[in-house]
Image: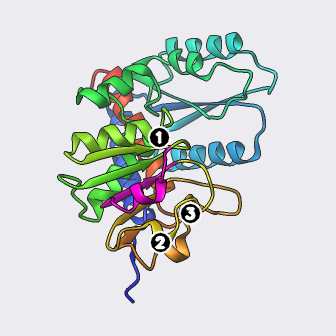
């Protein structure tokens, strides 16, 4: 039996970051100002700390200044909103990333909405979601945008295909469905209350797993020849798809890690430089 081809995100992400670095250098030379990405982290969740550090390192390699704001786990919604409003008003900051989750005691949506749309390089605000949904200029959610770029990289045209998105989060499941719809896919959203989930997934030409439950999607759930994008990341480097069984059925499949993750960071950095260029009038 032929195994699926891996949709490696590392190589295309590297190319995007290299191109972004050239644009950042040209922008800095032309304006005297380097693009700046502010990262905001509430608390010290180990995974979040690691993600933020990785994004900071990639930013520096791409010629993007990184400003990190570390807030204690006891930070209130009002305090976080105030911090984000200050960054939004700061002309020296061109992009803002609020690392999530932020803690159950914080109104995450209120925090996201404190980010100015022109600096929402992670694509988490109402304005960004509306722009994605209506095909208007704006910033796409970083992970969904990275997924679409990865599909393009491997020659997967969503037009006319049945796409099933497992997950309905505001920053991953919902926006990736809208981006696929804009590419003329027929999109079905599934979630924890979907009846006969396996049967629905089995009809998909493209499966996007973004539910945050390890190995929820099994090989037997995959239509032979389907394209499988695993956007989940669980402890132990485990995705939302049971890779070992799914690789026997799919035609293309993303590894975890090394698939969607690198494309997410590349998209974030690319959008930061774009935001800086617009704000600097270039």
Name the residue that disc number 3 marks. 257
Measured along the vertical axis of the image, is residue 107 above or below residue 62?
above
245, above or below 151, in the image:
below
Look at 47% across and 28% down and name the residue there. 124
Q: Nearer the viewer, residue 79 or 193?
A: 193
Residue in the image at 48% along x and 53% along y:
196
Where residue 266 sits in the image (x, y, percent)?
43, 49
Under circle 1, the secondary element is loop
Residue 53 in percent (x, y) is at: 65, 46
The magenta-colored residue range is 194-210
Q: How far is mark 2 from mark 3, CA to CA?
A: 22 Å
Q: Is residue 207 magenta?
A: yes
According to the picture, the residue beneath numbered tag 2 turns out to be: 220
Residue marked by disc 1: 172
Numbered disc 2: secondary structure: helix
Contact? badges 3 and 1 (CB < 8 Å)? no
Q: Which mark is residue 205?
A: none
Mark 1 vs mark 2, CA separation in Å: 25 Å
* Mark in the foreground, 1 or 2: 2
Q: Is residue 168 left or right of residue 251?
A: right
Q: Nearer the viewer, mark 2 or mark 3?
A: 2
- Other-residue count near label 2 (Cα within 10 Å), few / some / many at <14 / 14–19 / ≥20: some
Q: Residues within 10 Å of mark 1 (few under 14, many from 20)?
A: many
Q: Quadrant of the C terminus?
A: top left
- Work out whether residue 85 or residue 112 is closer to the camera in this orientation and state it: 112
């Amino acid at each position: 039996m032929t195994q699926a081809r891996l949709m490696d995100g590392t190589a295309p992400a590297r190319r995007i970051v290299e191109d972004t670095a050239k644009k950042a250098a040209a922008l800095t030379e032309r304006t005297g100002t380097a693009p700046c990405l502010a990262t905001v982290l509430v608390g010290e969740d180990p995974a979040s700390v690691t993600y933020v550090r990785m994004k900071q390192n990639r930013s520096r390699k791409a010629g993007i200044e990184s400003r990190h704001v570390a807030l204690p786990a006891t930070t209130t919604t009002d305090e976080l909103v105030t911090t984000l409003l200050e960054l939004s008003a700061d002309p020296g900051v061109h992009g803002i990333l609020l690392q999530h989750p932020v803690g159950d005691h914080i109104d995450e949506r209120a925090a996201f909405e404190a980010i100015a749309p022109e600096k929402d390089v992670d694509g988490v605000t109402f304005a960004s979601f509306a722009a994605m949904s209506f095909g208007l200029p704006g910033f796409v959610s970083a992970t969904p945008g990275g997924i679409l770029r990865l599909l393009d990289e491997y020659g997967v045209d969503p037009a006319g295909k049945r796409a099933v998105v497992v997950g309905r989060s505001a920053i991953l499941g919902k926006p990736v469905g809208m981006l696929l719809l804009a590419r003329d896919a027929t999109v079905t959203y599934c979630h924890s209350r979907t009846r006969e989930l396996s049967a629905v997934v089995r009809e998909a030409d493209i499966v996007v797993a973004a539910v945050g439950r390890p190995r929820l999607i099994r090989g037997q759930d995959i239509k032979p020849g389907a394209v499988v994008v695993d956007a989940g990341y669980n402890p132990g480097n485990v995705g939302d798809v049971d890779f070992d069984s799914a690789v026997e059925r799919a035609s293309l499949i993303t590894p975890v890690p090394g698939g969607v993750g690198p494309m997410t960071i590349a998209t974030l950095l690319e959008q930061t430089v774009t935001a800086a260029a617009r704000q600097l009038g270039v």
